[in-house]
């Protein structure tokens, strides 16, 4: 089976102004299959966000290639294959909630009735229909992030790229958001999710695979399969396998730091 | 103001979902303004009566301070200024207020023309600078340098040039525009470029064009900054028009009124003050119009709930 995303010999070096350069990513090789939910986990400064942005074609790699559906990452971006969700919801203050969800559809020149239909459908999916006329500041952090997910999904991208989307939320909200995200991922057939996080529990709970990165230079130290049964629920968190897998990820992280 | 909204918005709790009614704040503002006017009147008239009761001299230790600036030929009574509005400035002429209203309409027209001209020029420059760092580095220093040249030195040249090309009527608006475009350029440029990194990344992830990014992100992001600039420029355009009228030889504007009444100050101080208050009033009117427009256009901001 050909992977939807194939990353080969990827290296990213940031050129500093005076103190030389920093090797952010060192020879990353990773294949991601269609429909996977893969987490990139690692401590701060391991380059996981950089890797996500290189896949998204927001940052150019120093060497190596990213192939998406047999295309370059640049072509995939132009073809609107990517939906992005950032740590801060990045909603536009001057747009109502409905208008925020419609933003990508406006950029992509969807006709107005289609924009309205899709945006309302997406707001229903994230259960925020009654807030469509509100402005971002009138919503809580968790609600804002749900709007940003609705916005990312509105144009049905094949790949959802998420950069620590729930990192700023409290533990309770975060767990609820995890369940909602899994529900959405199940609803949309064949959607691939790449999820950056530094929470072990979150990575194990959500993912079909966890890629562990080690810092300075950013290297892929281990890829761990998460064969926990689907669909996942609060019982999943109490399974013995959940603890075993969490421990494996934790050890991989520790090993990466010490080596 | 705009910055603080952006910084706090993502973590604002949902409990602030409703705007507080603005009526009470408005009443407070009006009361504060009235109080300020009362204080100014008290201070003005108090200083005059203090000067008079001391024979316009104040002994401090061995030396005396001359208080003659408070006498009626140097600082008129406020009622005398109000009275001056209703008396003719020239023998058998119309009352002064009527003349000043006509002059104000003329000057305001020229100022508005210049304000529009400068606003558009300032905005276009900012858009060019925001998209080309080469232009910004190459041209912006000259834009800044242009503002260090006193308007008094430039105004007569503009008048001569415009008359030479047969467009003498454009001289005053151009001089007003010279004072207005600069704040618009600087503030708009800041608003267009000071965009959160992820907001821009979001646009790139949609493969948005530069025009789409300008229209849907940079411009709305710049609006609060643009209105700050417009409020500054509104008053500057009045100053520009008044100064521009002097070398233009315009006989029916506030500029000439201010100049004439300055020359005849010793004979009738209240007239100059009447003209000064009139100029200040139209400046405030233009400022107020911009503030009103701002409230109408920018409705998405967090309302302060104090």
Image (cartoon, rainbow, N blue to C red):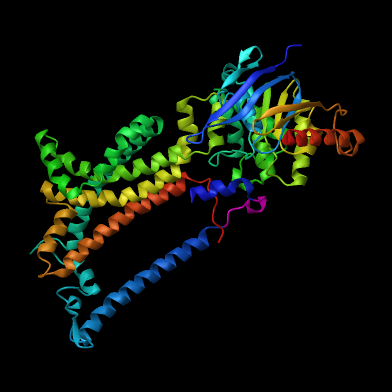
State whether the magenta stretch is mostly helix, strand or loop. Answer: loop
Q: Kindly give the residue lying farthest to the left in the view shown.
A: B91
Q: Is residue A18 above or below residue B75?
A: above
Residue at point 73% right, 47% down? Answer: A170
Task: Inspect the magenta stretch and tell me whether residue B17 lies in it.
Answer: yes
Q: Is residue B73 above or below residue B247?
A: below
Task: Inspect the magenta stretch and tell me whether residue B16 lies in it.
Answer: yes
Q: Residue B77, how many percent across, how many down?
A: 22, 75
Numbered disc total? 0
Residue at point 32% right, 49% down? Answer: B234
Residue at point 49% right, 48% down? Answer: B2
Pick the quarter of the image with the N terminus of chain A: top right
Q: Residue A147, how many percent across, how many down?
A: 65, 37
Pick the quarter of the image with the C terminus of chain A: top right
On the image, which quarter does residue B177 sit in? top left
Q: Kindly give the residue lying farthest to the front in the view shown.
A: A259
Residue at point 37% right, 54% down? Answer: B288
On the image, which quarter does residue A233 sit in? top right
Residue A117 visible in the current orientation: no
Q: Residue B269, how many percent across, how many down?
A: 15, 69
| A103, A164: nearer the viewer | A164
Q: Residue A186, how many percent across, how many down?
A: 79, 26
On the image, which quarter does residue B130 sit in? top left
Q: Is residue A112 above or below residue B236?
A: above
User: What is the span of residues highlighted in magenta in the rendered image?
Assistant: B13-20
| B214, A259: nearer the viewer | A259
Residue A188 visible in the current orientation: yes
| A135, B12: nearer the viewer | B12
């Amino acid at each position: 089976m050909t992977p939807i995303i194939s990353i080969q010999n990827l290296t990213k070096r940031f050129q500093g102004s005076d103190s030389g350069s920093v090797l952010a990513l060192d020879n990353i090789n990773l294949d991601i299959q269609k429909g996977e939910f893969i987490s990139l986990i690692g401590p701060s400064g391991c380059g996981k966000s950089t890797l996500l942005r290189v896949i998204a074609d927001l940052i150019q790699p120093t060497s190596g290639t990213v192939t998406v559906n047999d295309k370059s990452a640049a072509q995939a971006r132009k073809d609107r294959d990517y939906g992005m969700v950032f740590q801060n919801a990045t909603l536009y203050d001057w747009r109502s909630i409905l208008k925020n969800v419609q933003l990508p559809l406006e950029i992509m020149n969807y006709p107005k009735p289609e924009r309205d239909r899709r945006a309302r459908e997406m707001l229903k999916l994230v259960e925020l229909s009654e807030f469509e006329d509100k402005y971002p500041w009138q919503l809580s952090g968790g609600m804002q992030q749900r709007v940003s997910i609705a916005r990312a999904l509105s144009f049905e991208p094949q790949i959802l790229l998420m950069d620590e989307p729930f990192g700023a939320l409290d533990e309770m909200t975060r767990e609820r958001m995890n369940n909602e995200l899994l529900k959405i991922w199940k609803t949309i057939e064949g959607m691939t999710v790449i999820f950056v996080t530094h929470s072990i529990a979150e990575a194990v709970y959500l993912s079909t695979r966890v890629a562990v990165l080690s810092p300075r230079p950013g290297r892929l130290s281990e890829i761990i399969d998460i064969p926990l049964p689907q669909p996942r629920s609060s019982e999943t968190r109490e399974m013995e396998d959940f603890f075993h897998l969490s421990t494996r990820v934790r050890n991989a992280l520790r090993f990466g730091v010490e080596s | 103001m705009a910055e603080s909204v952006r910084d706090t918005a993502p973590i604002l709790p949902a409990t602030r979902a409703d705007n507080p009614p603005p009526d009470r704040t408005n009443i407070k503002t009006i009361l504060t303004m009235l109080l300020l006017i009362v204080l100014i009147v008290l201070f003005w008239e108090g200083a005059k009566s203090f000067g008079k009761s001391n024979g316009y001299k104040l002994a401090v230790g061995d030396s005396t301070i001359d208080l003659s600036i408070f006498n009626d030929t140097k600082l008129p009574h406020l009622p005398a200024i109000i009275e001056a509005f209703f008396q003719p400035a020239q023998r058998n002429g119309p009352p002064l207020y009527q003349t000043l209203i006509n002059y104000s309409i003329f000057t305001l027209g020229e100022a508005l023309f210049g304000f529009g001209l400068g606003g558009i020029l300032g905005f276009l420059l900012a858009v060019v600078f925001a998209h080309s760092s080469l232009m910004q580095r190459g041209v912006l220093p000259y834009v800044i340098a242009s503002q260090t040249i006193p308007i008094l030195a430039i105004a007569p040249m503009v008048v001569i040039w415009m008359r030479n090309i047969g467009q003498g009527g454009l001289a005053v608006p151009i001089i007003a525009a010279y004072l207005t475009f600069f704040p618009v350029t600087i503030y708009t440029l800041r608003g267009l470029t000071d965009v959160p990194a992820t907001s821009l990344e979001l646009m790139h992830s949609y493969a948005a064009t530069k025009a789409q990014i300008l229209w849907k992100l940079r411009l709305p992001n710049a609006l609060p900054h643009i209105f700050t600039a417009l409020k500054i420029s509104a008053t500057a355009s009045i100053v520009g028009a008044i100064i521009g009228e002097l070398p233009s030889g315009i006989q029916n504007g506030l500029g000439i009124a201010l100049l004439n009444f300055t020359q005849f100050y010793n004979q009738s101080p209240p007239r100059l003050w009447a003209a000064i208050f009139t100029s200040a009033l139209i400046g405030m009117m233009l400022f107020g119009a911009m503030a009103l427009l701002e409230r109408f256009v920018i409705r998405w901001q967090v309302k302060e709930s104090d």
